[in-house]
């Protein structure tokens, strides 16, 4: 058919025009496909992170959390429970003899107060499809040497003063002394010794001392020293006690599709298979260089590390996971839990169910996807927010720009063919034929543009995926509004450092056929739109244009 | 039809158009009559209105006033659709710039008028090209043809529907004189051997010797 051959000739013999317009259309189409695909992929990743609950088969978490911001408003009963749940009493004397090393773990529930595990059976079965219990505790670990407490006292050096009166010499005694002196001097002279010489003076003094009355020669006094009590304050005990801190969770092992961790989240090792076993969070295990099969001491008990887990419930992660009953025994909290994970019967009315469950028992608080989403920050959220804004504004701009450029190019190309169109009219082509011809050409250009666009888009998406773009989402960790934030700072001297979980999400852009179809339609309709404008312009041209001289 | 019957007739034909503030009578009260088989040569300086006159006769434009009769039908009053049909069926145009469609081959340019492709049409296309001596060049693009060859393709295109009237506007204007003479000879043969009514606008003196009638136009009027 002539029209098809004419069409083919126009497309293939004006190839530079064909390529230019088709590329313009293709770019618009590719931008649309890539933007929408990236946005959809980001949204999918975001949903996964923003609703971590769904990763553990949960819609709603029920806890009995105390709001640390409003501690003053807590009623007395709750306050008492909180103190009971967070009591630390370490009597070093009970841990061993001075000099011996000790290790002690105190289990605290922080602001996540415990409640009886019976509560789980009270959940309204019409609202709840499945539920699992959990106990998440903060462990304050202390170890070191029991100190020897001694105090040293040094006595002596006191001065006692004795004061007594002695009677003076009588005349007779004085005469006796003088006589002793005169006799000694006479004896000395008789021996030829001068009484004033050194030797003479000593002999005279000895003779006089001997003549002294008895009372001048000896005095004996008896006294009792007063009783005294020494009080000495003993300074700070120098010890090597160190305090560590970790979070441990008791997992409801009766459930395998709902719980704090699930068997399919074990990345190495196994799920619980027997008694005295522990599963470690991968990041905690890496930090402590744990090896599978090794032992971890907790609460004085040696547990065997059987598995490593990468928990998917980012908001309530623990460092170590034990079967619930084991943790209850270790922490002396028999039949106590502090979290219930609930799968709602009706996935559509999670919020309503959440509100009903909140009235389950005194102080019950529920958390659903809406609440967890608020705690997430990071590049993933930024990127997704950006893309959501981007997709609205930019797509419109890109489509508009592409339409304008393609329309201009098409109208321009029709203007260049003004004499050709005039000639066709002069030789008897009707307007209908001319319009049909131009629109057909544009549909073909649109199809070529769509093919180019899809190719460009698929290539760009492949390139994006090739470069392994990673985005992070950070879920608030031990900061103020999480159960153990205050406990960690209070007991473990931790700063307010953010130890939240950062999840890295690999951006995998997936293109759906629907998006590709949409992108293709943008190219085809863009070209059709431009072609219609051009064709209408052509139909208004007069056949006289055929007589215009060459430009 | 009678060889001496009137095929083209204009009565008090006027075409005005505005140029700035002035109204110009490009064709001013022209009365013209052509018999079937005439070869009319129209001469005149540039801007004299000779091309406008031809466009009115060819149904490419509507007159401001007056009548144009083709085969006794007043075409100044018929619809655009009828005019298109008239151009396709009754009139063959030849332009100074050949006006071939650059993306189509010689044969396709000729075929564009009938825009169908039966075996018969194919034969007609080749016959028309053969008539102008171009059957060997049927599948060449215009850009590969010389000016003379291109104008011969244009003539073949004008002939394909076997119209009664051939209107040629400066058909030799873009050709060297030798080639121009060839083209005039072809047009003259169409007139003498095939009985076509031919109207040629030209500056060429050479054409005069084939003419059955020569008119000169100046300022929209026939002066001789």
Image (cartoon, rainbow, N blue to C red):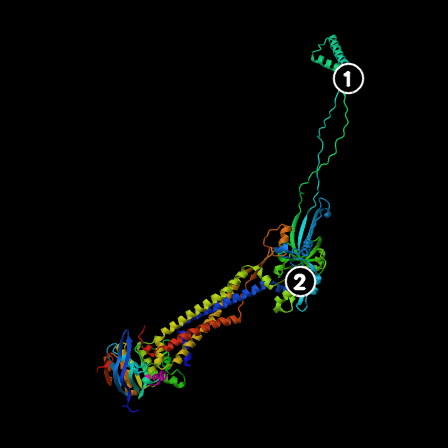
- Do the residues under discs 2 and 1 have CB atoms within 8 angstroms? no
- Camera-side residue: B131 or A149? A149
**Could you classify mark 2 by the number of other residues whose Cα lies within 10 Å: few (under 14), some (14-19), or many (20 or more)?**
many
Answer with left or right where residue B195 lies relative to residue A357.
Answer: left
- Residue A262: numbered disc: none
Q: Is residue B2 above or below residue B143?
A: below
Task: Determine the image quadrant of residue A163.
Answer: top right
- Please tell me whether mark 2 or mark 1 is closer to you in this view: 1
Instruction: Report x, y in % for residue B189.
Output: 28, 85
> Which segment did they paint magenta?
B79-91
SS at mark 1?
loop
Above-or-below relation of A11 to A139? below
- In the displayed structure, A58 sits above or below A417; it is above
Question: Can see residue B104?
Answer: no
User: Where is mark 1, residue-wise?
Assistant: A213
Residue situated furthest bottom in the rendering: B2
What percent of the width, then of the height, locates residue B153? 33, 80
């Amino acid at each position: 058919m002539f029209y098809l051959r004419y069409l083919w000739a126009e497309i293939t013999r004006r190839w530079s025009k064909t390529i230019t317009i088709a590329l313009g259309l293709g770019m618009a189409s590719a931008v649309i496909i890539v933007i929408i695909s990236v946005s959809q992929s980001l949204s999918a990743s975001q949903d996964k992170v923003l609703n971590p609950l769904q990763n553990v088969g949960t819609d709603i978490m029920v806890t009995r959390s105390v709001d640390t911001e409003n501690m003053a408003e807590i009623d007395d009963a709750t306050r008492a429970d909180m103190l009971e749940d967070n009591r630390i009493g370490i009597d070093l004397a009970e841990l061993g003899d001075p000099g011996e090393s000790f290790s002690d773990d105190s289990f605290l529930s922080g602001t996540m107060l415990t409640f009886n595990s019976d509560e789980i059976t009270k959940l309204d079965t019409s609202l709840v499809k499945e539920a699992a219990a959990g106990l998440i505790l903060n462990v304050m670990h202390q170890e070191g040497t029991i100190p020897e407490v001694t105090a040293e006292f040094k006595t002596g050096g006191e001065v006692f003063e004795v004061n007594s009166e002695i009677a003076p010499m009588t005349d007779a005694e004085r005469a006796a002394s003088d006589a002793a002196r005169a006799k000694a001097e006479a004896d000395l002279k008789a021996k030829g010794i001068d009484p004033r010489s050194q030797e003479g003076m000593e002999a005279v003094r000895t003779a006089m001392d001997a003549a002294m009355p008895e009372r001048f020669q000896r005095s004996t006094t008896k006294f009792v020293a007063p009783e005294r009590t020494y009080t000495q304050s003993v300074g700070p005990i120098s010890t090597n006690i160190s305090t560590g801190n970790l979070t441990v969770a008791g997992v409801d092992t009766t459930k395998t599709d709902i719980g704090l961790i699930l068997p399919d989240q074990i990345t190495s090792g196994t799920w619980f298979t027997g008694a005295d076993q522990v599963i470690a969070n991968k990041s905690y295990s890496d930090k402590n260089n744990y090896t599978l099969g090794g032992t971890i001491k907790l609460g004085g008990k040696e547990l065997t590390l059987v598995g490593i887990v990468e928990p998917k419930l980012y908001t309530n992660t623990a460092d170590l996971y034990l079967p619930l009953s084991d943790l209850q025994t270790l922490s002396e909290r028999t039949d106590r839990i502090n979290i219930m994970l609930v799968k709602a019967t009706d996935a559509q009315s999670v919020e309503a169910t959440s509100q009903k469950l909140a009235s389950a028992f005194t102080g019950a608080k529920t958390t659903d996807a809406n609440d967890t989403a608020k705690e997430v920050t990071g590049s993933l959220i930024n990127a997704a927010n950006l893309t959501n804004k981007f997709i609205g504004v930019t797509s419109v701009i890109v489509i508009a720009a592409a339409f304008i450029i393609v329309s201009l190019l098409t109208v321009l190309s029709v203007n260049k063919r003004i004499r050709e169109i005039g000639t066709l009219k002069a030789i008897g082509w009707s307007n209908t034929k001319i319009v049909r011809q131009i629109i057909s050409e544009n549909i073909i250009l649109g199809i070529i543009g769509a093919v180019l666009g899809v190719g460009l888009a698929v290539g760009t998406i492949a390139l994006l995926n090739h470069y392994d773009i990673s985005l992070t989402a950070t879920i608030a960790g031990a900061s103020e509004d999480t159960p153990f934030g205050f406990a960690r700072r209070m007991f473990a001297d931790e700063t307010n450092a953010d130890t939240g979980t950062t999840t890295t999400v690999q951006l995998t852009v997936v293109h759906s056929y629907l998006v590709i179809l949409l992108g293709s339609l943008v190219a085809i309709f863009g070209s059709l739109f431009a072609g219609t404008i051009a064709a209408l312009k052509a139909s208004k041209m007069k056949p006289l244009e055929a007589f215009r001289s060459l430009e | 039809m009678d060889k001496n019957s009137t095929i083209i007739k204009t009565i008090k034909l006027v075409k005005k158009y505005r140029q700035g503030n002035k109204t110009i009578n490009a064709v001013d009260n022209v009365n013209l009559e052509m018999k079937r088989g005439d070869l009319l040569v129209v001469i005149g300086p540039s801007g004299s209105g000779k091309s406008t006159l031809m466009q009115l006769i060819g149904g490419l434009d509507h007159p401001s006033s007056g009548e144009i009769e083709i085969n006794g039908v007043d075409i100044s009053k018929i619809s655009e659709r009828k005019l298109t049909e008239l151009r396709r069926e009754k009139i063959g145009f030849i332009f100074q710039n050949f006006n071939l469609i650059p993306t189509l081959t010689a044969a396709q340019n000729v075929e564009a008028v009938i825009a169908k492709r039966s075996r018969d049409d194919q034969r007609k296309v080749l016959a028309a090209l053969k008539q102008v001596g171009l059957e060997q060049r049927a599948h060449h693009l215009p850009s590969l043809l010389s000016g003379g060859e291109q104008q011969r393709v244009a003539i073949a295109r004008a002939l394909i529907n076997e119209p009664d009237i051939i209107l040629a506007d400066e058909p030799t204007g873009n050709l060297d004189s030798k080639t121009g003479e060839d083209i005039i000879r072809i047009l003259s043969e169409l007139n003498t051997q095939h009985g076509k009514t031919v109207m040629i606008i030209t500056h060429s003196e050479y054409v005069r010797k084939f003419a059955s009638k020569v008119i000169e136009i100046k300022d929209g009027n026939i002066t001789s």
